[in-house]
Amino acid sequence: MAVVAFVPVRGGSKSIPLKNIRNFCGRPLIYWNLKALEEAPEVDHVVVATDSPQIREVVESFAFSKVLLFDRSAESASDTASTETAMFDYLDRDGSRWTDKDVFVLAQATSPLTRREDFSGALQHFSEGGFDSLLSCVRFKRFFWTADGQSKNYDYRQRPRRQDFDGEWMENGAFYVSTIAAIRASGLRISGHIGLFEMPEYTAIEIDEEDDWLMAEQLMRKHQPQLLPDYTQIRLFLTDVDGVLTDAGMYYSEEGDELKKFNTRDGMGLQLLKAQGIKTGIVTSEDTRMVDRRFKKLGLDHLYQGKKHGGKLAAALDICEKEGLDLSQVAYIGDDVNCLELLSRVGFPACPADAVDKVKAIPGIRVFTKKGGEGVVREYVEAILAGRT
C-alpha cells in the first residue's frame, strides 16, 4: 500500500495573488506543507498540481526527493472549479500508478502550520481505526447560537467554564485522508466511515485574506519557532551584485560604456538593515566604478570587488575579523557558481529565484520568489526584519 499526498495550488488566486509562493515566515508559503510531507516517513510521494509556471519553478527549487509536479488543466484551475475537480483531473490523467487500496492525502498549502507529526499521526490513526476516510479538526471551545436566539451547544442558564466545556469539532481544512477506492466510488474527498484527527486549536486558521496571513505568521513564530531561521543572530548582511542587485544583463551605450540596472527597493532594504544595527556590504567578482558609486551612495560598510576563485569567502572572513564576527552570523545572497564556497559557509545563505541549480541545491539555502534585479534583496531584508520582531 502506497501513500500519495496531493497538494493543489493554482496561480489565479484573487484575494492574494500568487499567494502559494509568497514569502511566509522566510519561505514561500507552499514550502511548509511540502517540507512536512517530505519528512513524514509514511508518505511515499507528494504531487503538486499547478497551472502556474512560476509556482512550478519555485517548487522545483526546493529539490525535495518525494515531490512530483503535475500540470493542472485549465478547467480544474478555474475560479469555479472544486478541489475534487483538481483531484480527479490528476487521478483520471495520471493516477493509473495507484491502486484502489492506496491512500490519498489531500493537503492544503494554505494551512502552513501543519507539522510532520500531524501527517504521521493522522495516517497512523487512519490505519489503526479502520476508517474509509479521515479529516483534520480542531476542538473549538466557542458558544454558538441560532439566528432566532437559541443556544446551540450549551445551556446558557448553566454556562460552563471553558475548562469544563468539551467544545465542538471544527474542520480546519489542513488535510483529508481517504483510500483511492473511496474517492473513486463517492466522487468526494471524504466518505463512508469517517474519522477525526485532532490538531492544536491554533491551526484553525486558513490563509485566504491579508489579515489571515499576518495572524498565521505570528502563530507560526509563537508555536513553531524551531522551524524558522533565527534571524536575530544576523550581524552582517552581504550581497553579490550581478544577478542579485542587478538582473545580470549587460547594457552598453552608443559610446560603449557599460551600464547596470539597480533596483531602488533593494537600496532601501539595505538602509533598513543599517537602521537595525546590522553591518552591510557588497562582495563581488566584478570591479567597476559603477558598483563603487552605488556602494558610496548607499553608505554601506564594506566593499570588496574583483573577488574570484574563492576570493569571496576570503573577503567575508576578512570582514568578520574586522568586525569581530563569525560566519555563522553572516547572511549572504548570491546566484552563481562563484558564490558556492561562501554560500556553503555562512549561517544564512540565500539566492534569487533564477539562481543556477548548483546554488539552489546548497543544503539549507533559502530560495526567494523574486529574481535578481527585481527586488530580491528587499525580499530577504523584509524576511529578516519580520523574523526579528
Image (cartoon, rainbow, N blue to C red):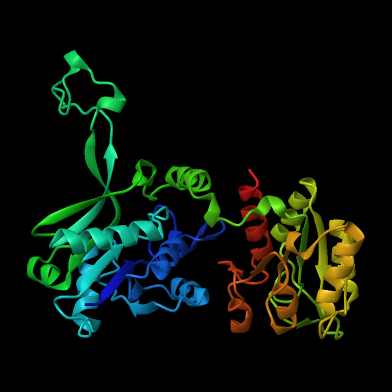
Q: Look at the picture and state if 68 lies above or below 169.
A: below
Q: Residue at x 28, y 21 (%)?
A: 161
- Describe residue 13's horizontal placement relative to residue 133 as left or right: right
Q: Nearer the viewer, residue 82 or 367?
A: 367
Q: Residue at x 50, y 48 (%)?
A: 217
Q: Look at the picture and state if 75 lies above or below 110.
A: below
Q: Look at the picture and state if 298 lies above or below 344.
A: above
Name the spot of residue 247 as percent of width and height, x first.
Answer: 68, 75
Name the spot of residue 243 as percent of width and height, x first.
Answer: 70, 76
- Describe residue 258's horizontal placement relative to residue 129 as left or right: right
Image quadrant for the N terminus? bottom left
Name the spot of residue 389 as percent of width and height, x first.
Answer: 63, 43
Q: Is residue 309 visible?
A: yes
Q: Nearer the viewer, residue 339 or 321?
A: 321
Q: Nearer the viewer, residue 8 or 309?
A: 309
Name the spot of residue 345 as percent of width and height, x first.
Answer: 73, 72
Q: Residue at x 46, y 60 (%)?
A: 29
**The quadrant where residue 350 appears:** bottom right
